[in-house]
Amino acid sequence: MSKAIINITNTKCCAFCKYWWDPTCKYIMPNINNQWYYETTAQCRCIKKGHDTFAHSNCSMYRLKIEI
Ligand code: SF4
């Protein structure tokens, strides 16, 4: 596993998408303000696409799951 940090206001990653099945948010962790850590190589099921995707992927159906 490898960690990265992003600003969720300007970066789209499956790890922060409400369609990525990580109900306990085990692959993401807050830092400060809108900066978050995530496990870039984690894979979970995308419930829109019906298959697993990497945490660092994204697509046009992305919807942020965190209230900012
Ligand atoms: S593939 Fe698209 S819809 Fe699925 S989790 Fe990633 S950003 Fe969200």
Image: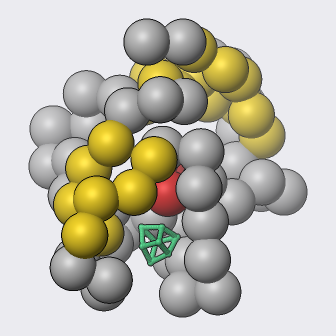
Query: Which residue is drawn at the image coordinates 61% and 77% (left, top)?
Result: 59
**Residue 53 in picture, x, y percent from top left:** 39, 57
Residue 48 against residue 5 in the figure, above or below: below
Query: Which residue is drawn at the image coordinates 26% and 50% (left, top)?
Result: 44
Residue 62 against residue 6 in the figure, above or below: below
Q: Is 55 in front, or is 36?
A: 55
**Residue 41 in picture, x, y percent from top left:** 47, 29
Relative to 67, is 27 on the left or the right? left
In the displayed image of the protein, which residue is found farthest to the front? 51
Q: Is residue 68 visible?
A: no
In the displayed image of the protein, which residue is found farthest to the left? 23
Relative to 5, is 1 on the left or the right? left
Q: Is 7 in front, or is 20?
A: 20
Q: Kindly indicate the quadrant of the structure image that contains residue 40.
A: top right
**Residue 15 in picture, x, y percent from top left:** 46, 48
Relative to 33, is 29 on the left or the right? left
Residue 38 against residue 14 in the figure, above or below: above
Image quarter hosting the C terminus: bottom right
